[in-house]
Image (cartoon, grey):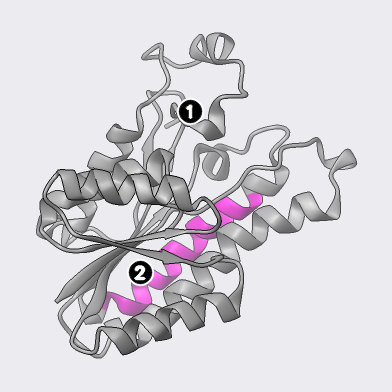
Amino acid sequence: MKYILVTGASRGIGRAICLRLVSMNMPILINYNSNYSAAGETKSLIEELGGKAELLPFDVSNKSEVEKAILNWEESHPDDYISILVNNAGIRRDNVMFMMADEEWHQVINTTLDGFFYLTRCLLKHMMPRKRGGRIINIASLSGVKGLPGQTNYSAAKAALIGATKALAQEVAPRKITVNAIAPGFIETDMTKDLPEEELKKLIPVGRFGKPEEVAALVAFLASDDAAYITGEVININGGLYT
C-alpha cells in the first residue's frame, strides 16, 4: 500500500495539506516534533473525513531520529511504502542579521534544509527501486524567492531548498519521481500571526493573506497523476505580491 508523509503536519499549512490529501484515498503519516495534542487533532479530523492516519513523531533536523522513525515504520509495514512526501516542516527565527544569534541561524537552516536532506534521502532509497513513480513536494517560501528583510536565515534556507528541488528533480525523473516546490506568500497561520497583517495586505494585489487550504489545493494537484509531467518547478502562491 502507498502512503503519504507530511512533515510539520500538526497544524497550519501541514494540517490543511493532510486534510486535502484525504481525497487521494491513501493513508497519511502525520509527522510532528513536540505538539502531540495538535497532531492528534489532525489525525481525528482526517478520520472524520473517512481517511486513515498514523502519527509519526520525530525531529526532521535530527538525522538519528529521522532514520530510526522511518526504519521502525518500514519494519512494521513490510509490504507498504511512502510514495508521496511533503517536506513542510519549518520554523522562523526572525532578526536583522547583525543581531542574529548563532542559534537563530542554525535552527532555521537545520529544520528546513537538513530536514529535507535527511528525510528525502532516506525515502528515496526505497522509492526509486520500485519504478512506480513518486512525488516529492517541498514547501518553500516567498522569502526564498524574493528575500525578505529580517529573514536572512529563513530566506537562505528556503532559497537553498529551491535549488535542491531543481537539482533533485533531474536526478530522479527517469524513475518517474517528480520533485517540485511551492513558495507561499503570506498565509494565515500561527507562523504569521505576529506580522502586521493590515500593513502587509496593502502590498498584496489581491488585498488579503492566503489561506492554508489554498496552498493545500496546489499540493494536491502536484501529488496527483495529472501533474506527472511537471517537475523541477517552483510555483508561487502569493496573491500577486511577487511573480
Query: Judging from the image, what secondary structure is the residue with disc 2 in?
Result: helix
Q: Nearer the viewer, mark 2 or mark 1?
A: 1
Disc ID at residue 169: 2
- What amino acid type should be assigned to the residue bearing mark 1? Phe
Where's residue 99, x and y in %? 89, 39
Q: Who is closer to the viewer here, 10 or 147?
A: 10
- What amino acid type should be assigned to the residue bearing mark 2? Ala
The magenta span reads 156-173
Instruction: Tell me if I can see residue 32 in this picture.
Output: yes
N-term-proximal mark, 2 vs 1: 2
Where's residue 189, x and y in %? 47, 31
Instruction: Tell me if I can see residue 136 in this picture.
Output: no
Q: Residue at x 37, y 79 (%)?
A: 123
Where's residue 234, x and y in %? 38, 49
Q: Who is closer to the viewer here, 10 or 205?
A: 10
Residue identified by numbered label 1: 186
